[in-house]
Amino acid sequence: MAREITIDPVTRIEGHAKITIRLDDRGEVADARFHVTQFRGFERICQGRPVHEMPSLMSRICGICPVSHLVASAKACDRILAVEPPPTGADLRRVMNLAQVVQSHALSFFHLSAPDLLFGFDADPDGRHLLGMLQANPQLARDGVGLRRFGQQVVESLGGKRVHPGWVVPGGVASPLEADKRDRILAALPEALAATERTLAWYKASVVRWEEEAAHFGDFPSAFMGLVDADGAVEHYDGILRVVGADGGLLAERHDPRPYWEYLGEAAEPWSYLKSAYWKDLGYPDGLYRVGPLARLNVADRMGTPRADAELEEYRRRLGRVPASSFHYHHARLVEILHCLERLEALLRGPDILSPRVRSRAGINRNEGVGVAEAPRGTLIHHYRVDDHGIVQWANLLIATGHNNLAMNKGVLQAARRYLRGDRLQEPMLNRVEAVIRCYDPCLSCSTHAIGQMPLHVRLLAHDGAVLQELTR
Amino acid sequence: MTGDGVLVVGYGNALRGDDGVGWHAAARLAGDPRLAVADVLARHQLTPELAEDVARASLVVLVDASADGGAPGSVSVRRLQPRPDAVTGWTHHLDPAALAGLAGVLYGAVPPVVLVSVGVASFAGGDRLSPALRRALPGVVEAVARVVEEQGRA
């Protein structure tokens, strides 16, 4: 008798989703799916709005990564205006984007995933929370809170608000950086760097406990995609889009990544509101690839900053040149935090960072524009068409979580096959299935939806819909 | 001058009508000479990242909308006890007592924390307060200033 297990909602992720696991007649996992159950519709909401409103409007997509949407949207608008931001304007966009990566990665690592890494996947869920972490490892908890605070304060000091700042605008940024703000950020950097290095040391010492999970949490060969700069270093704002295969071999380099429709396809399934992007040459669904921290480290030759490069060297010594397990997103995320802090410091110490020339102004000079940048969770693409008056007629967004959708589904299936046994549900095995999803840190845009508690509700159903078992926490 | 070391946080959803009363109050308090040296913040939620600010303050005043049955525009003021045991969720926000508790556990200091609650008329979408809350806003500001002044005399 075929049966179905539903995990609804999936907890400790950004947004609302559920997992369905279908068992066959023998009680073994036949299929597993990750469903995104919320609908946003921003591509429609923005139709009819003036293009200059787009960055502000699009930043409302998410309360965790609003800066990524600001940046990708502003870059699409730059194309429509046919302008390049002044160098300082571009650098200030970079600073804000890097700060957001720091705070977003800190949220993912410390708040959402560290409890599993600290207490174990078999631990009582009632103890896997912030207070438990405070008691077990107060320094780790303080570092997590401190790093997120640092990133938020940089975003706030630049944009006036820590959530949905409107400071990134078409043509550059709205106002120059003031010296006292720069100096305050620089003064806070040493502690942020120290907190990151303490956390990396803790993670590297702890991760040996999780070799079994690392081998079954989305461990499969795939392509990886991300931006690099002209020297092959990790890049978050603008650069060459590089795709490598599972063996690290170069599959493609797009010096102009904007015509994404030439190399990426988009597929929709009736069971999820999240579309799946795929590499066109390989078709759907074989064209699976991954984006985000793991992918950025896999596609890049180097990080491009000294401390992060030393960590990358150790990371590759431990895990190989192209780690395949999605478990290693956690490690990659920490290396990226270190890189972002170093890069941020270099940019803020630049001789022209206080220049008043931060914005180029122009009217509507094109009817179409695409912006590509790296968000915390991976490559982000905004594509707009406008009429001659600059009124948005059409928009398409390709977000990081959509790039990773096929990989997340494959990872859930792999973990379910490994950890689910028979027709009785136990919390630790369900936590492992959920934890695969948390590796990717999917952002399902929680900002306008979350009411706080997101209990885990699991149902085991017979083929006729009868509830065989129900678990809640 | 009062307000030295005082942290005032008005919080709520500024786009949900009266839920934004904390933001409106914070905007007025930021320009109030009686709180010239206080730190006045407006936030969507109370988050763990505020714990360090709380621990460093000599007094914390939180301003929030309340849907607990008070008449629209009614203002209540109460001292909170820190509750570190309430820090259990994995969400982005904390309740006021949990925030105070977190400050104590993380940074070893909890100043007096006072919650100023304002009864609401409507959480309908929009960035404007209802007429009842607009009328009540000066009273909210006075209530916060009074708490700060009393603390300064203590």
Image (cartoon, helix red, strand yellow):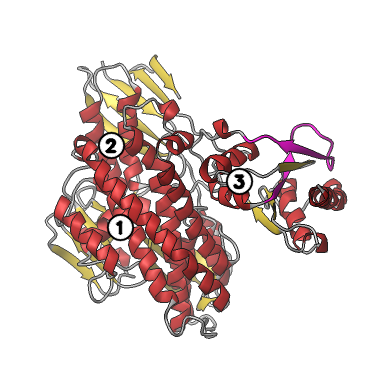
Q: Which mark is residue B86?
A: none
Give the residue number, with chain letter if any, for mark 2. Answer: A412
Amino acid on which the number 1 mark rests in the picture? Val
- Count residues near mark 2 (Cα–Cα under 10 Å), then give few for <14, some for 14-19, many for 20+: many
Q: Is residue A430 above or below residue B131?
A: above
A109 in the magenta segment: no
Amino acid on which the number 3 mark rests in the picture? Leu
Q: Are marks 3 and 2 on the same chain?
A: no
Give the residue number, with chain letter if any, for mark 1. Answer: A335
Give the residue number, with chain letter if any, for mark 3. Answer: B46
Q: Given contact means CB atoms under 8 Å apart, are the residues at marks 3 and 2 in contact? A: no
Which range is magenta?
A: B58-82
User: Which quadrant of the figure contains the C terminus of chain A?
Assistant: top left
Q: Is residue B52 above or below residue A230?
A: above
Amino acid on which the number 2 mark rests in the picture? Val
Q: CA distance from mark 1 to mark 3?
A: 29 Å
